[in-house]
Image (spheres, rainbow, N blue to C red):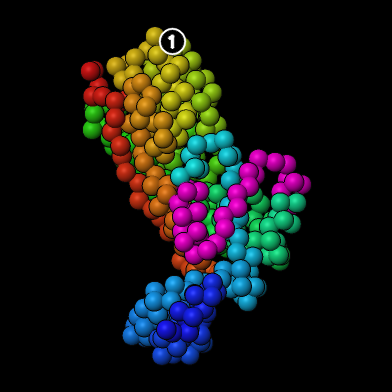
């Protein structure tokens, strides 16, 4: 019977020294293998991993955090927890952090500027090890304060903030939507945008505009509608479209919620989708495929974005250098809300 067997028989958990003895290495080498595996040889790593399996040893996360002066928490700042877009991003973040024994905390940032200050006081290094920011409206100086922990930006970004960004290809996605409609012989293509000061709106508008210009399609101001990423602004745009005598045959929307509101209200007002107007969304949120007609949209791989943001945060906490910006590709999902012109 081994020492580890004796401890298990006594109801005591195995220790690092048990792993070290079976692996034939020092306890320092075991610790190095667990925290910085790239610093040990493959043979040593394999020996330690085998010893861990034999002993059933598990890392004491609380003790590790205490040694490294960490809280074991990462805080995600979300502009609206009511928005279904963020659920799968948070799922991706949580999965990666959980695998490393790190807790995910989430805060909704829909609040006044003075309350943001209190939020960042909470998020100081004494309570969280890092911030994953999904809200591009927070001032850079708030997140650059001396007490602020390391920051990773995801989905949205903040000008002037020196922190890595994990972003979908927003401009490319909007251009992809125009290309899809052009292939269906549409030339009169309108645009339903998000808030003018939003980074996503700006990138998607740039992609839409450039794609229209490259094809020589007319950019008519009356075919551009200002929304706010909500169902209600999609419904409002539908009323404007229905009142037009000379309307576009297709609309590119900056998110799925507006697209779904647009489709529902157009049909109430007697216009058929896609018979009278084809509609393309952006995001591929869960109910995009369950509206009638099902929404053609640009799919952001939201879990992939969340996973990438979490991995980047873990790297920052280990002192790794970072790329300033990582662009995640998007894809077109063709459903029933688009059709060839005249069909």
Q: Residue at x 68, y 57 (%)?
A: 123
Residue positioned 73% across, 41% down in the render: 112
The spot of residue 136 in percent (x, y) is 58, 48
* Total numbered labels placed on residues in the image: 1
Magenta span has 111?
A: yes
Is the residue 139 above or below the residue 147 in the image?
A: above
Q: Image quadrant of residue 319?
A: bottom right
* Depth check, front residue: 40 or 172: 40
For the N terminus, the quadrant is: bottom left
The residue tagged 1 is: 269
Residue 220 against residue 16 in the figure, above or below? above
- The residue nearer to you, when weighing 203 against 292, is 292
Name the element at disc 1.
loop
Q: Is residue 64 part of the magenta span, yes or no? A: no
In the depicted structure, whether residue 159 falls above or below residue 162: above
Q: Where in the figure is residue 26, as x and y percent of width and height?
A: 48, 90
The foreground one among 137 and 294 is 294
- Asked if residue 141 lies left or right of residue 316, the reply is right
Residue 158 visible in the displayed image = no
The quarter in which the C terminus is drawn is top left
Which stretch did the figure color magenta?
89-117
Q: x and y percent of residue 240 in the render?
A: 48, 17
Q: Is residue 162 visible?
A: yes
Q: Nearer the viewer, residue 81 or 62?
A: 62
Residue displayed at 41% across by 21% down: 263
């Amino acid at each position: 019977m081994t020492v580890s067997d004796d401890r298990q028989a006594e109801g005591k958990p195995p220790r690092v020294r048990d792993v070290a003895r079976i692996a034939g290495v020092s306890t320092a080498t075991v610790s190095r293998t667990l925290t910085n595996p790239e610093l040990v040889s493959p043979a040593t790593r394999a020996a330690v991993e085998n010893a861990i399996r034999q002993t059933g040893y598990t890392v004491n996360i609380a003790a590790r955090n205490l040694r490294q002066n960490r809280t074991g928490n990462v805080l995600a700042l979300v502009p609206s927890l009511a928005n279904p877009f963020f659920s799968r991003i948070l799922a991706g973040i949580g999965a990666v952090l959980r695998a490393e024994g790190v807790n995910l905390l989430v805060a909704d940032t829909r609040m006044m500027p003075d309350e943001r200050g209190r939020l960042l006081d909470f998020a100081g290094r004494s309570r969280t090890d890092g911030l994953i920011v999904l809200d591009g409206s927070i001032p850079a100086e708030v997140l650059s304060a001396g007490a602020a922990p390391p920051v990773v930006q995801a989905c949205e970004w903040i000008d002037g903030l020196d922190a890595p960004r994990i972003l979908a290809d927003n401009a490319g996605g909007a251009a992809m939507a125009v290309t899809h409609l052009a292939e269906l012989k549409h030339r009169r293509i309108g645009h339903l945008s998000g808030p003018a000061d939003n980074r996503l709106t700006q990138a998607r508008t740039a992609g839409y505009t450039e794609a229209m210009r490259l094809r020589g399609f007319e950019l008519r101001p009356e075919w551009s509608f200002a929304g706010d990423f909500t169902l209600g602004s999609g419904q409002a745009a539908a009323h404007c479209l229905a009142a037009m005598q000379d309307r576009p045959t297709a609309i590119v929307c900056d998110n799925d919620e507006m697209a779904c509101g647009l489709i529902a209200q157009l049909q109430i007002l007697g216009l058929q989708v896609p018979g009278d107007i084809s509609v393309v969304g952006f995001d591929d949120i869960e109910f995009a495929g369950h509206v009638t007609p099902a929404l053609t949209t640009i799919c952001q791989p939201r879990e992939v974005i969340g996973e990438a943001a979490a991995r980047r945060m873990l790297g920052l906490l280990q002192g790794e250098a970072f790329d300033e910006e990582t662009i995640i590709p998007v894809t077109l999902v063709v459903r029933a809300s688009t059709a060839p012109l005249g069909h």
